[in-house]
């Protein structure tokens, strides 16, 4: 025996249909670093956002409302009346109003092409990295239940546009002082401006958006406006991973800023 014979019946990369290589992978670099860092980053966000979404407190510091809690759709919303609030869920809704709307940004990111790659690699090791064999016996990809449900991403994209619209409205409202007078600006306004820019850039750079804008066309020359828009989205799309991380960080920071001001850690510095 040479040690390189395929081990029959063990499935996965050891079947006779696959190359008879003894080593599970031939890479000698630190290929595990990227999935490990990805897993740590995603876990940190999940822990933080779960704590904040269930906290049901410190999500409003006039004129700022946390992006995790907007739009606020329950009667127990403790935000300014002129914000994007509607008592759709009435007084029977007793838990955190963030839970009502979280499904939309969460669903958008969970089904995002980039995040799929990130958590398939870092949490499911399917595969853990390029040219590293996956440990699973079988692979059905996204062709069957449950992963075929990832196809709902294109619909989450439309929901994400609405959510980005609401956060844009919140950013406009942040140009007021705590007494709702217009023409003012604080450090929170800058935090909100950076966040909404990154949220839009991430949303527009979506692969589904690229297809909606430029897909199903036979001749770009007959659709010059869509061609220009497709080129623009394509340029952003090339940075989709970076924008996914930057906007994840910025939305957490915007929420954390509201938390710090609302809980009295410091007062929002006002520029004018
Ligand atoms: Fe990432 Fe659509 S592919 S948001």
Image (cartoon, helix red, strand yellow):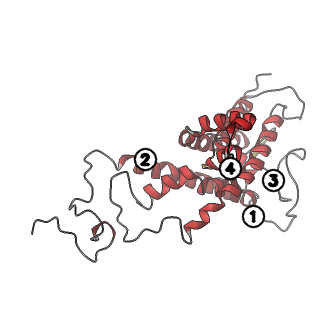
Q: Residue at x 56, y 55 (%)?
A: 46
Task: Tell me which residue sits at (62%, 41%) in the image.
Answer: 247
Precedes in sequence: disc 1 or disc 2: 2
View extreme (top): residue: 272
- Alpha-carbon distance for marks 3 and 4? 37 Å
Residue 44, image x and y in percent? 52, 50
Camera-side mark, 3 or 4: 4
* Residue indicated by mark 2: 37
**Pointer 4 or 2: first along the chain:** 2
Mark 3 nearby-residue class (10 Å; few <14, some 14–19, many ≥20): many
Q: What numbered label is drawn on residue 95?
A: 1
Residue 266 shows in the view? no
**Marks 1, 2: nearer the viewer:** 2
Q: Nearer the viewer, mark 2 or mark 3?
A: 2
Q: CA distance from mark 1 to mark 2?
A: 33 Å
The quadrant where residue 195 appears: top right
- Residue 5: x and y in percent read 17, 68
Q: Which mark is residue 72?
A: 3
Residue 62 in which image quadrant? top right
Lower sequence index among marks 3 and 4: 3
Residue 225 visible in the current orientation: yes
Distance in Å between CA atoms under marks 1 and 4: 44 Å
Q: Is residue 97 above or below residue 265?
A: below
Which residue is the site of mark 4?
A: 216
Q: Nearer the viewer, mark 1 or mark 4?
A: 4
Q: Which quadrant would the C terminus be assigned to in this image?
A: top right
Q: As drawn, is 81 to the left or to the right of 233?
A: right
Comparing marks 1 and 3, which lies closer to the viewer?
A: 3
Query: How far separated are the C-alphas under marks 4 and 2?
Result: 37 Å
Q: In the displayed structure, does residue 175 sit left or right of residue 56?
A: right
Q: In the figure, is residue 248 to the left or right of 24?
A: right
Packing grade of label 1 (10 A; few <14, some 14-19, many >=20) is some
């Amino acid at each position: 025996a040479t040690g390189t014979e395929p081990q029959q019946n063990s499935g996965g990369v050891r079947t006779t249909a696959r190359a008879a290589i003894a080593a599970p992978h031939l890479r000698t670099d630190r290929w595990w670093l990227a999935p490990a860092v990805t897993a740590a980053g995603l876990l940190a966000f999940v822990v933080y956002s779960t704590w904040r979404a269930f906290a049901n407190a410190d999500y409003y510091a006039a004129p700022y409302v946390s992006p995790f809690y907007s739009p606020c759709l329950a009667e127990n919303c403790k935000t300014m009346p002129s914000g994007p609030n509607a008592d759709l869920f009435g007084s029977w809704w007793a838990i955190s109003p963030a839970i009502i709307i979280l499904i939309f940004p969460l669903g958008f990111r969970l089904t995002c092409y980039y995040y799929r790659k990130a958590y398939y690699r870092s949490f499911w090791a399917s595969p853990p990295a390029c040219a590293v064999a996956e440990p699973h016996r079988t692979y059905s990809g996204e062709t069957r239940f449950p992963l075929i449900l990832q196809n709902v991403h294109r619909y989450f994209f439309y929901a994400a546009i609405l959510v980005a619209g609401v956060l844009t409205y919140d950013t406009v409202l942040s140009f007021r002082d705590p007494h709702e007078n217009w023409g003012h600006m604080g450090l929170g306004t800058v935090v909100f401006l950076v966040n909404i820019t990154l949220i839009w850039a991430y949303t527009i750079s979506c692969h589904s958006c690229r297809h909606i804008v430029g897909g199903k066309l036979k001749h770009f020359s007959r659709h010059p406006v869509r061609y220009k828009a497709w080129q623009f989205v394509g340029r952003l799309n090339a940075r989709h991973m970076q924008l996914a991380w930057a906007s994840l960080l910025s939305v957490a920071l915007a929420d954390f800023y509201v938390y710090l001001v609302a809980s009295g850690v410091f007062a929002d510095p006002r520029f004018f």
